Image (cartoon, rainbow, N blue to C red):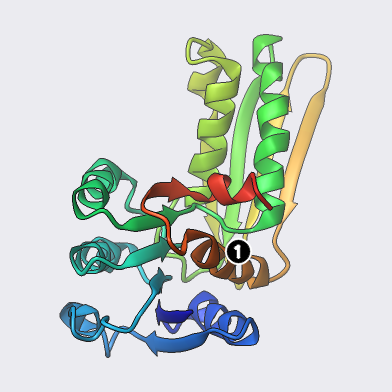
Amino acid sequence: MKLLILGRGKTGSLVAEVAAARKHHIRVAGAAENAACAALAPEKLSDIDAVIDFTAPHCVLANIEACVNAGKNMVVGTTGWDKDIDHVRTLVAQHKTGFLYAANFSVGVNLFFDVARAAAAALRHDYSGQIFERHHLHKKDAPSGTAIAIQQVIRESSGHGSHQYDDLEITSFREGEVVGLHEVVLESSADRIYLCHDAKSRRGFAEGAVRAAEWLAGKKGFYDFKDVWREL
């Protein structure tokens, strides 16, 4: 496949490395090359099979609009644009492109979502819950997209009417070079349950994003990583 990777940050650079190792032809555009979506003009994308975005919350929506308008499939790993998700879903349907996003492309984190889904039953048995997340100082959005996804998974699995959900707060920390640590704490008067995922590197995110682009080839529609995860 011919892939355009948006973002020269730590994750974007690793995506490029993983894609090259998986024998894809890659092009990379950082913030300078893609100012005002210059790298996403239709003529620049003519030979590109899919675009993978690991940029920043302030520019991701413009990148999505440019790619979808050009009729190109896109994988988005940037978080912090949740409020625009319905708009993007409509755009993808109108232009009949393939679009896939995730709060987190790591296989380990998607396993963690399944664990959290099972543990959500605790909220029906007089447990209260909290979510803690830690990331590096340079992360732009807080809380993290992964923490919000965990909160949503627990909410859906415990039942929307659960009053304990109201207390399922997310506390964010930004420190040092922490790759990503997410913890769920469920507490009752009798005991305390800790669930934790601690990413040791960004490689899991990068590998998942490239595999998502491969999975999306030839498909049209709006997907998220759990659609890929079911088949892995």
From the viewer's perspective, is residue 230 above or below residue 129?
A: below
Q: Could you tell me which residue is drawn at 48 percent across and 20 percent down? A: 166
Q: Is residue 143 visible?
A: no
For disc 1, the marked residue is 208
Residue at 27%, 89% (x, y): give it.
32
Helix, strand or loop under label 1: helix
Quarter of the view holding residue 202: bottom right
Q: Position of residue 65 (x, y in %)?
A: 21, 62
Is 37 drawn above or below residue 61 in the view shown? below
62 sits left or right of 211 in the view: left
Q: Position of residue 227 (x, y in %)?
A: 54, 45
Q: 128 or 112, which is in the foreground?
A: 112
Residue at left offset 56%, top offset 32%: 153
Q: Foreground residue, 47 or 19?
A: 47
Residue 3 seen by the camera? yes
- Residue reaching furthest to the front: 218
What's the residue type where badge 1 is placed? Gly
In depth, the one of 33 and 131 nearer the eye is 33
Quadrant of the image occupied by residue 62: bottom left
| Horizontal side, residue 118 vs residue 151: left or right | right
Q: Residue at x 63, y 70 (%)?
A: 207
The percent position of residue 144, horizontal first and vertical second, equals 49, 52
Residue 74 lies, in percent from the top left, at 37, 64
* Number of numbered discs visible in the structure rendering: 1
Residue 102 placement, left or right of 31: right
Dot 1: within a 10 Å radius of its alpha carbon, few (fewer than 14), some, or many (20 or more) residues?
many
